Amino acid sequence: MSDQQIVVHLTQEKDYRFQIAFEDGAPDLTADEPPPLGSASGPSPVQLLAAAVGSCLSDSLLFALRKFKQNPEPVRCEVQADVGRNPEGRMRVLRMKVVLTLGVEAGQLAHLDRVLDQFEEFCTVTQSVRAGIQVTVEVYDAATVRLK
């Protein structure tokens, strides 16, 4: 039995363009495949997956730092999703690289080592995706010093 159930409704509008509605009242959005299948009138499923991983990791890092009353804002995130063919010749997301950048220098944040050691473990989406896709995570501070 799950602790929570998320329900999302997708309705085809035209070809590969779908309207996505969320039961919790979040704003609807449109998803679409890029040409030649669709018209790119919204993010593709791969882009939505990358956004979900990036958003969840950003949230997890921010939450972990705020637990220690730290202010790392603004946090930025870039996700690179490599799409290619698997050994069976089918298109798949092969790997993802996530780069998180804090809005302040590391020296301004207490307990940063502890946060960096743990925050990924609390990211529901990333840990679920890692069951099938390699996800690497790098963290930098505002001075572009690599922290993780």
Image: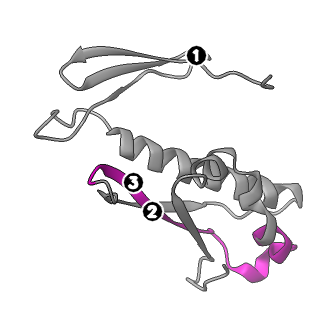
Give the vertical position of 137 relative to 57 (above or below). below
Q: How is the image coloured?
A: one colour
Q: Earlier in the sequence, mark 1 or mark 2?
A: 1
Residue at left 72%, top 80%?
Answer: 106
Question: Can you tell which quarter of the image residue 45 is in?
Answer: top left
Question: CA separation, marks 1 and 3?
Answer: 29 Å
Instruction: Give the residue type that dot 3 points to.
Output: Val
Question: Can you tell which quarter of the image residue 41 is in?
Answer: top left
> Where, quadrant-wise, is the N terminus in this rendering?
top right
Instruction: Give the residue type that dot 2 points to.
Output: Arg
**Residue carrying label 2:** 95
Residue at left 55%, top 50%?
Answer: 53
**Residue carrying label 3:** 93
Give the percent coordinates (x, y) of residue 116. 76, 71
Question: CA separation, marks 3 and 2?
Answer: 6 Å
Relative horizontal placement of residue 35, taking residue 98 as reference (left or right): left
Magenta stretch: give its range.
Answer: 89-116
Give the percent coordinates (x, y) of residue 71. 76, 62
Give the vertical position of 79 relative to 22 (above or below). below
**Residue carrying label 1:** 25
Is the C-beta separation of discs 3 and 2 under 8 Å?
yes
Instruction: Give the residue type that dot 1 points to.
Output: Gly
